[in-house]
Image (cartoon, grey):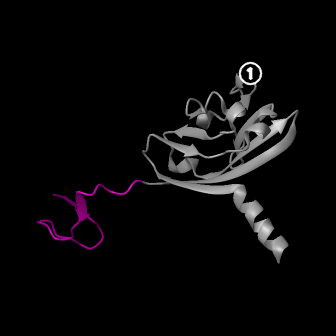
Amino acid sequence: MKMMILLLLLVSQHASGVEVYEGVESVLLPCRIQADDSRSATELLWHCDEFKNPRVHVRLLSGDDLHDQNVRYVGRTSMRADALQTGDLSLTLRNPTVFDSGTYTCITLRSKEELSWTEVQLKVTEAPPPVWAHRNGQNNKQNTGNESELTYL
């Protein structure tokens, strides 16, 4: 029984979820490891396997390496400059859309050997209508029941 509980704790350490509305300025995909572990890493890879080219962002000791980045993410990703020194490997994704929804993986490597990984489930949903708008079936037009109309207060 103790082993099962320990296993559940280990799994929950490496998975998280983030949900935002489309139209927000940015979303932070969290990834944190011990600073000692991140300082021994030579490469950090963020990827999303739902695309043919899964590379979202790559950080080397010398800085970002974005030449093989998936075109969907060009100009939309960033990380802290001191990420590999501090262990805060979180990724900022600007202007997220519903098409960005999926599972993102943060992997630290040393000489191509995997040191750690964290999965983040991102869900981007369409923004709700403004608070000042509500549905109203009663107005001057004949409502056939097939259309919905917005009334602005």
Is residue 151 a member of the stretch shown in magenta?
Answer: yes
Q: Nearer the viewer, residue 68 or 78?
A: 78
Q: Horizontal placement of 153 versus 111: left or right?
A: left
Local crowd size for mark 1, using a 10 Å CA cut-off: few (<14), some (14–19), many (≥20): few
Residue at x 68% of width, y 35% of height: 86
Residue at x 70% of width, y 43% of height: 47
Percent position of residue 57, x then y:
67, 35
Percent position of residue 40, x then y:
82, 34
How many numbered marks appear? 1
- Residue 54 visible in rendering: no
Q: Identify the element where label 1 is drawn.
A: loop
Task: Give the image quarter of residue 13.
Answer: bottom right
- Residue 92 visible in rendering: yes
Task: Give the image quarter of residue 121.
Answer: bottom right
Name the quadrant of the C terminus.
bottom left
Residue at x 29% of width, y 55% of height: 130
For disc 1, the marked residue is 62
Q: Quick check: 146 above or below 11?
A: below
Percent position of residue 123, x then y:
55, 55
Magenta region, mostly helix, strand or loop?
Answer: loop
Q: Quick check: 21 above or below 96?
A: below
- Label 1 sits on what residue type? Ser
Name the quadrant of the N terminus.
bottom right
Residue at x 44% of width, y 40% of height: 25
Q: Horizontal placement of 10 versus 131: left or right?
A: right
Percent position of residue 96, x then y:
51, 44
Q: Nearer the viewer, residue 125 or 64?
A: 64
Q: Horizontal placement of 133 versus 1: left or right?
A: left
Outermost residue toward the left in this view: 140
Is residue 134 a member of the stretch shown in magenta?
Answer: yes
Magenta residue span = 127-153
Outermost residue toward the top in this view: 62
